[in-house]
Image (cartoon, rainbow, N blue to C red):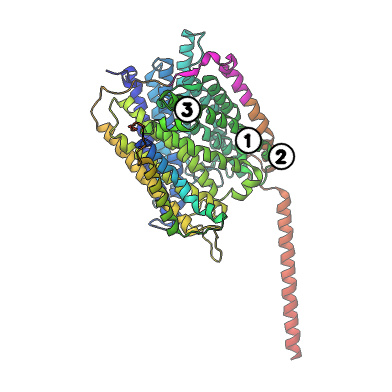
Amino acid sequence: MTNTYIESFPAEAKVVRAAFYSSFLALAIGGLFGIIQTLHRTGYYRFIDSADYYTVLTAHGVFLVITFTIFFLVAIFTWAITTSLDRPVEDIRFTWFWYGLMVLGTILAAVPILAGFTDSEMSASVLFTFYAPLQGHPLFYVGLVLFVVGTWLAGADWFRSWLAWKQENPDERIPLPTFMVLTTMLMWYIATLGVAAAILLFLLPWSLGIIESVNPLLTRTLFWFFGHPIVYFWLMPAYMMWYIMLPKISGGKLFSDPLARVVFVLFLILSVPTGIHHQYLDPGIAEGFKFIAMTNTMFLLLPSLLTAFTVVASMEHGARQRGGSGYLGWLKALPWRDPVFAGMALAGLMFAAAGFSGMINAGMNINYLVHNTFWVVGHFHLTVGTGVALTFMAVTYWFLPQVTGKALWNRSVALGQVVLWFVGMTFMSNAMHRAGLLGIPRRTAEPQYEGFEFEAAVGSVGELDAQIALGGLLLTLSLVLFFANIIGTVLNNRSDDLPANGYADTLSGPSDAPLVLDNLKLWTAIAIVLVIFAYTFPLLSIIERGGLFGPELNELPVSIGLGLEYLWTTVVTTVTSGVDTAIAIITGVR
Amino acid sequence: MRISKGALLIVIAFTAPLIVELRTVLAWVNVELTVLESVVLSIGLIVLILVWALWPQEGTPQATE
């Protein structure tokens, strides 16, 4: 018998497994909408009405970037806490409760989204960016609230485990995986305050008819308060895998535990005060506030660059342990045949490319050129669509045997799957970025306009569409292979020949990390202060101009509008009567 | 083989970004390729990689991983 996770924590393994399956179901549904959308938009195969495109887009976005990613991360966070603290959760019934709440929230939110395809009046075709003036059915907002509350309770579950462990180990440093989970959840608690306020105070009462209107700019700003840090909520679990699993699978050790802690602390304090960089093109927010958001965003490059250094250094250490040598020759010694390693390494590489397009998005002046174009879609297909999703799929090949006790169905298929995802996303995201540079818009079923043609510097728009469609097909094929492997593994018999549960050792361990890094209260306080600095004045300014509940109108344009209308009426009346008089005179003369 | 089969697969996958941007790079030096020419060139590139990888290397043990 091997020391797998299911053997060490059988009760927790059931919850983790359930969360994985929920995640994979969302991936299947979201992926299906992805290929429908790709073929429709590129014009290769259209069987839905273009009016339903927004519903497809909403389902694709919500199921993938919220449901797939977050169910997956609660699974690996539960694994990380129990494994690194080496103790079960305090009350497994509570763990099942928050998981159940997340499932209930997902179902409630999914019903109105999918109802958008029917003749029912119920719909929530509001995209992942569900701010006003788009309005969804109340059930959608209730579902989101329950889902987020489920994640809050999950966090409480993990904090509870840590506090219990701390009482028994008062002088021990927080184990690295637990440290990563706790800092990520602290970031999440702060970030979700924005979306909780947006839904509970404005969007839900508005959709229920309790209040007549909302301030669209206010709900947008509250959404992005949460909408950017949620990117890190997806990303930090992927980073956790790159830090604690990738070095182990490379055959070595994590280069530096202290550096990993610094990175997660930086994400905690810098993730939230950046959301306004999604609003560079929003009127009603002063340039100065946008500039502050840009500066904060640029600081966020630091933890990502530190991660690139640490992860590559760890991989190099692993490769040299395996006999690799030379400046670049060590790359050959890495376990490229292992889908877990190859998938994570390819995901990291694509994420580096996403970092470069992210820098472009973050810069105020360049953002103006690409903001509402396909470029942005290309960018997040590299970040969440590859950096995160490919990492999650790759580590599934390690985790699924751990939580089922069954060997992976087919390692070669798994390797082919991760490579196919990389190639498919290369075609798709490259063409999306290039299309964005031509000014081709996003969020529309039919980006073409009559009497206007987009012109590519090299090749043609038709070729870009072909690349996107080809990419979409390869990604869909990759998903089919992924699910074939999942189903094959689940149907396998139990195996006694599985690797033991665990994560990477470190070259420079926790004892080398300054004690202050483990002071979670301090970092949380700093994070809150930075949020207050970044958001107090923009929010006050928005409320002052548009009111809490009113559409953002003020008296001046209204009076100007009335004046122009009066002037126009007077001019038209005068001209008409003048013409009539002239005609009468002329007629009379005749 | 100079590299393992797994590494060879990854190297071929790495050519995908090169292939899709090859026309742009060549256009900078005023070499304009059609889609067909790009595809032929890409296949040639992959064949070259295969030949390099599969060519036996003297005095080097066969990679197995």
Q: Residues within 10 Å of mark 1 (few under 14, many from 20)?
A: some
Sequence-earlier tag: 3 or 1? 1
Asked if the residue at tag 2 contacts the one at tag 3, i.e. Cβ–Cβ closer than 8 Å, the answer is: no
Circle 3: residue type = Glu
Label ID, residue A298: 1
Q: Residues within 10 Å of mark 3 (few under 14, many from 20)?
A: many
Q: Residue at x 39, y 20 (%)?
A: A502
* Residue A63 % position (x, y): 42, 40
Q: Which residues are magenta?
A: A504-527
Circle 2: residue type = Gly
Compute the Cα span from label 3 to label 2: 43 Å
Compute the Cα span from label 2 to label 1: 15 Å
The dominant secondary structure in magenta is helix
The residue positioned farthest toward the front in the image shown: B58
Q: Quadrant of residue A226?
A: top right
The answer to whether A488 is drawn above or below residue B25 in the figure is above
* Residue A337 % position (x, y): 36, 34
Q: Residue at x 57, y 50 (%)?
A: A372
Q: Chain of mark 2?
A: A
Of marks 3 and 2, the one in the foreground: 3
Residue A516 is one of the magenta-drawn residues: yes
Label ID, residue A288: 2
Report the residue marked by disc 3.
Answer: A316
SS for dot 2: helix
